[in-house]
Image: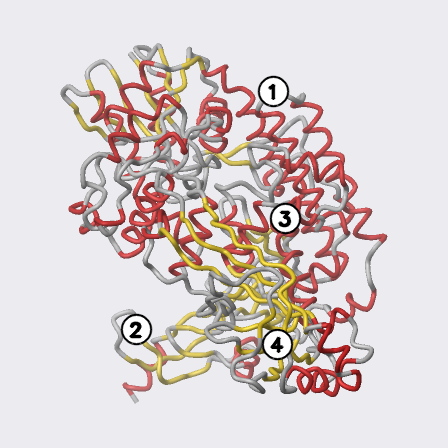
Amino acid sequence: MRLIIAEKHSVGQAIAQALGGHAEKHNGYIEVGDDLVTWAQGHLVDLAAPDEYKNHDWGKWSLDTLPIDPTPDWQWKVSRDKGADRQYKVVAGLMRRDDVDMLVDACDPDREGEAIFRRITSYANIHKPTKRLWVASLEEEAIRQAFDTMKPESAYDGLAHAAEIRAKADWLIGMNASRAYSLAYNTRFTVGRVQTPTLSMVVERDGQIALHRPTPFWTIHVPMGGWQLASEQRYTSRPEAQRILDLTNTPGVTFDVVLKERRQQHDRPPRLYDLTGLQKDMARLHGLTAARTLTALQSLYEKRLTTYPRTDSRYITHDDLDTLRGLAEGDRLVTGFIEPSAKPERPRLELTVNDAKVAGHTAILPTMQADRAALDELGDDERLVLTRVARRMWEAVGDDYVHDVTNVVANIDPHWCEKHPDEGRLLPEGECRFTSRSDQPVSPGWHAIEHAAPQEDQDDTDETAGNIIPVNLTDGVFIAPVPQGGATLSEGKTKPPKPFTEATLLAAMEHASRWVEDKELKAALDDDESHSGGIGTPATRANIIEQLVHSGYVDRKGKQLRSTEQGRSLIDAVATKLKDVALTADMERRLSEVEHGQADASQVETEFRDLAARIPADAQTTVRQDHVQAKTRNTESFGGCPRCGKPVVKTGKVFQCSTNRREKQSDGTWRTTEGCGWRAWTTVAGKTITDTTMRGLLAGRKVSLKGFTSRKGSGFDAAILIDKDKGIAFDFNDNKERKRK
């Protein structure tokens, strides 16, 4: 009997349906004929936290315990996510059944999916024959075909090794760096292998903006009748600009057209979407965050309306052409998706094919299940994402966008300058050069597909709009302004770089080579067809941005992503290599080499271990004492801790013992790793506990307050007191005593 293990419940249901036959549902699995189908719940098994290693004193945050490295005795644990332990028991129990003689890894077809399956089997100590189901679409036919082409699980060992190395590297770097810099600066820092270099890009951009000083400049515009010439030079001196303006407005002045280029330009259709490309466009067109786009796309995948979401490919293979041809036939993906007139008459399907650039996953496409009826049943984000995926399919197979581009260069007539030496003497060539450009559509082609207006910055202007250069304008002719004396002077100011947006930061993470100065590394990253030289992966970039926002290192201000003071302090404190985009990109490249069998896994793991081992020493040698003083933890005491007697301090929205230290776990939860653990929230039942009240409570007094709100929304009054376990507790007996009196 086969046991098929999917990554999610919805995927397991789709597989069971595709298998056909009578399906019998059980607690945590489905029995279909001779097959059992079960599912994980994301990462059922995770790396253990440092304080869970009982043979090490890693629960205490101290420089004496650094560097932390569990090798070779790494410990794993069942996730603390709700229901994870229960589902793990189901999956492990099914694996151990005597009648199960074959396992099928049906987790998502990517690095993380491979990690999820292998961690379960390893933790459960299961060693049974295993095959890999690699399916990128949850349509029934696609699933059945995938079962026919399964490979041994060993064929994906490279993928599994890369996943395990990445997890351990992130753990080692994150734990050592976060603790080392937090201890060095007496504050709480969260340092990550990918998160910190990404933050560094945002901080650097914000620094460039802050240092920018607007410089005024002037440009001369000369009307030519339906179009205009503009001075090539931006004048930084108003008097100088005025001098040239007066010259251009002198009666009889003409311009000599010395260069005219007119060409008909054909813009090829864009490629199909990978995940990052879709996230960028959804942010640009609709203002969706990368996380919202991924959530919507994942839901569409599980509803069998799109193919696998976490892909870094923008092509399909020749084997997928029949599927694409089926999608392009008829009006099923026209009605409700695009204007019927915009549909290509002869879709150029071949433009989407490149076998060499498909490594495991094809580009994102709609499925045969997608149509107007399905679209109408979706939520807002899902509807927007599915529509954009369908439109990109039509764009990718559409006709070229054809447009006429004309560029003109014209000089103030040198003969006129000779005849008017007072006005034209000593006029440098650059000062008398004027330019113009027009860009006129001929055939909309694939541009006709998308009619949503992008949410671009308001100050973006198209200088070619309404500028139509006459078709009979030729090189060597002399032209005069219309009307004479109508040239004007416009003032502008230099602008700083634009702040990052969701779309532009994703692009920066994807193309890390733009931030790399080393020529050899830059060339290697640029040559990498799998995009592994970027910051993070398509599957993780959205989460990286959300982590930065959640940690308080980055703020969302409208569409903009801006660094906070806390984020800038972190980047100012950490060693260069931990925030170096090039280093992190190269690490991603090394993981890709492991995945594709081009590098030894143990060697790459050792490289990452060595890097992590040097972090604590680097933190101590580069520490800035002025920052330590500025970042000293708040030590104002509100009284003695009811558990241990040490001072109680206020940190954010919590009163807590000054000995407490909390650490974020790999599953996203926070855990007290040091100290007695006593704490009390500053708000109880909707009532704010003031500093004065807390001092009274910690002094042993009972305090009566009015204006509490129950869970049902009703108001009540009560007395509160300190509780060693709960922090603050209600004392309703005090109210009863008052009523008796």
As measured in the structure, the alpha-carbon distance from the residue carrying label 4 to the one carrying label 1 is 59 Å
User: Is 647 situated above or below 270?
Assistant: below
Q: How is the image coloured?
A: secondary structure
- The CA distance from mark 2 to mark 1 is 60 Å
Q: Which residue is mark 4?
A: 638
Mark 2 vs mark 3, foreground winner is 3
Measured as percent of width and height from the top left, residue 740 is found at: 28, 86
Q: Tell me if residue 450 comes above or below residue 370 in the rendering.
A: below
- Considering the numbered disc 1 on the image, is that residue within a helix, a strand or a loop? loop
Instruction: Looking at the image, tell me whether mark 4 or mark 1 is earlier in sequence order.
Output: 1
Q: How far apart are the alpha carbons under marks 2 and 3? A: 40 Å
Residue shown at 42%/14% (left/top)? 151
> Dot 2 surroundings within 10 Å: few (below 14), some, or many (20 or more)?
few
Name the image quarter holding residue 708. bottom left
Q: Nearer the viewer, mark 4 or mark 3?
A: 3
Amino acid carrying label 1: it is: Gly
**Amino acid type, residue under disc 2 in the picture:** Ser
Say whether marks 2 and 1 touch (CB < 8 Å). no
The residue that label 1 is drawn on is 597
What percent of the width, then of the height, locates residue 653? 52, 70
**On screen, residue 277 above or below 246:** above
Residue linked to disc 2: 710
Q: For the residues labelled 4 and 3, say whether their Cβ atoms are less than 8 Å apart.
A: no
**Quick one: 290 or 649, which is closer to the camera?**
290
Q: Are marks 4 and 2 in contact (CB under 8 Å)?
A: no
Residue 192's mark?
Answer: 3
User: Marks 4 and 3, Cα distance to the nearest angstrom?
Assistant: 34 Å
Q: Residues within 10 Å of mark 3 (few under 14, many from 20)?
A: many
Please, what is the three-letter code of the amino acid marked with disc 4?
A: Phe
Q: Position of residue 724 (x, y in %)?
A: 51, 64
